[in-house]
Image (cartoon, rainbow, N blue to C red):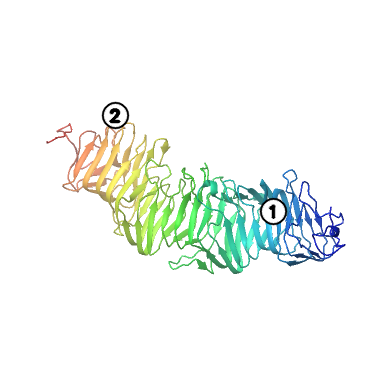
Amino acid sequence: MPIFTGAVNSNWGTAGNWDTGVLPSATGAGSDAIFNASSPNCTVNITTAVCRNLNFTGYTNTITMTNGILVGSASTANPGHTVTLSPTMGISGTGSISTRANGTTTLTSNGRVWPNGFGINNNFVAANSIATLTDNWTVQNLFLGPGTNHAMTLQGAFTITVNGNFVYSSVGNASRVIANAAALTTIKLAGTGTWSVAATFVGVANSVIGFGVSIVIDTPGTITIADNCCFGGSVSVAGTNFTYVSGTVIHNGTFHLLGNQGGNGYSINLNGSSSTSATTTSSTGVNFNNLAFTTFSVGASPGACAITGNVCVVGTLLTNPLSATKAPILTSGGTIYANGNFVHNGGMRSTSSTIVVLQGASVTYSESGASTSNVSWGTAWQIQINTTGSVTISTIIGFRDAGSFTYTAGAVTFSPGASILAGQSAAFYGFGSGGVTIPAIEHFTGSPGVTFGTLLYFYDTLPVRVLTFNLTGAIVNYTFTHKGTIGWDCDSFTCIVQPSSTGSSLRLLPSVEYKIRTSLIMLSWSTVVGNAMNVAADPNTGVSTIFTLLPGASQDMFVINAGAAGGPVNSSNGQTIYTRSGQISVGTLNWRNWDYPRTRHSTFVS
């Protein structure tokens, strides 16, 4: 194994300076570069300095890094290599140490700061590699990962302190930095520099799919986070976190919080601003320019991104699936203050406590693909409109899995065709007292092969004003239930139950008024008991629901409460409601069977 003796001069590139008479090699099994207590000063004078293992144990003199050193065999048949520093060695020059992605890289600093660039597995040999820290490291610049389609495990319960730039190079659908829960590594950004990543989020084939080691920003300087940086994903483990402690942070472009389909969660604590005038430069936390919750393939049990405190988004808040199946996004806790647009493209199929405050001066809220034929419609976030400006809802938007929509302040506009799709315990707050008219609500219960909950909650002091209210997607033994503290006031109300929808019903709050102004349609295409649309409050309360059909409104009722009485309904505030078939529940007021005619008529005039 070559030991540097300096027999000829101080140059690495002189073969006679090594006790074997041959330069260290990375070919085949390779050979080591050893600097011991007897080794003199050395200058890395060549651009091709390589070795299998780099060992400075006992070295007390100075290595001058005029050029870099590449550590590790270039042969996949010879994996594994080490870098060991000496606490007493001197270091000058600006050259970097780089290690190959080939088996396991073992890194020992012995407390010596490496004042130059340091690359961990940043030269590609094999697709899956491991880097193991045996102690803490401090480097000037850190270069992590070799690029395309490389899975690297970074382990060791230690910290890499970076005083300059941090570059993560990883592109492709197999690219990731994997964390080890038993030996979780932290990267600490502690100086002035840029965090950047070589990645383009345009599809699964060109996307980083995981960064699982923890990152802490704790610096007296300034950290710039470049476009397309990312954190989280399927490689996260318990304890993985992205944390702000101190320093000035500048964010450019879009940051990606990666969805975790592996079942393991991670956390973020970034102290984002809650101000509507927040900028992308902050000395008190991280304010994102644009923030995307980006997901990949579908997983049965997605892990949550646990949010502590505030997240600030100065520009666009985006949910961004990179597959057509819309892998689910799951977050918990925290408040996201969105000062720009909210674009919801991802799927959410689990209850979330995360609050999103739409508070910008001119916000557009949109969702792609919100429809009853799309399993992934809707958000489970707690969305709030609280702005001195305006919010435009430009598409159909959905609320599900206990997601909610709250109006506090601001001008709200629905674009033509925009409406709300809701189900699975969605809740609405403040729209009635806020004077916001919703053009349409579709209360959806299910689709073929999918079972959804059916509760909707309305909380307010005044009824929610809705122009068109449709109850759709009824499936067997499911009930449309409207609860909360207040009813609704709509122009047109429609509920059509198919013959297979045994046991479907509409249950409303007792002593609360539901008002229909122009058109009431309730149809069930079967006279079998239990297949009817049972309009009632909870029958156990004995208190009437107030169901008002205003005079002049049209009505089309067929098979209502057919042999299955619900609770009492008081419709005495408006015109008589007639049904052509069905047994009217006991205690119903001003609701009558229509004895004549019993057949429906249509007339064609040419």
Residue drawn where x is 67% and y is 59% of the image: 159
Mark 1: secondary structure: loop
Tag shown at residue 599: none
As rendered, which of 349 and 508 lies closer to the eye? 349
- Residue 290, given in percent of the width and then of the height, sits at 48, 59
Q: CA distance from mark 2 to mark 1?
A: 67 Å
Residue drawn where x is 77% and y is 46% of the image: 28
Residue type at numbered disc 2: Val
Left or right: residue 21 versus residue 277 is right
Q: Which is nearer the N-term, disc 2 or disc 1?
A: 1
Circle 2 Cα neighbour tier, 10 Å, few/some/many (<14 / 14–19 / ≥20)? some
Residue drawn where x is 67% and y is 52% of the image: 123
Select label 2 or label 1 by which is in front: 1
Q: Quadrant of residue 481?
A: top left
Contact between marks 2 and 1 (CB within 8 A): the answer is no
As rendered, which of 96 and 278 lies closer to the eye? 96
Q: Where does label 2 land, which residue?
A: 528
From where the camera sits, is residue 260 visible?
no
- Residue 38, given in percent of the width and then of the height, sits at 87, 62
- Rendered-image quadrant of the C terminus: top left
Residue at the far top in the pictured view: 528
Residue type at numbered disc 1: Gly
Q: Where does label 1 land, which residue?
A: 156
Q: Is residue 34 above or below residue 93?
A: above
Q: Is residue 47 above or below residue 591?
A: below
Circle 1 Cα neighbour tier, 10 Å, few/some/many (<14 / 14–19 / ≥20)? many
- Residue 472, given in percent of the width and then of the height, sits at 32, 41
- Residue 294, given in percent of the width and then of the height, sits at 50, 51
From where the camera sits, is residue 115 visible?
yes
Left or right: residue 247 versus residue 38 is left
Mark 2: secondary structure: loop
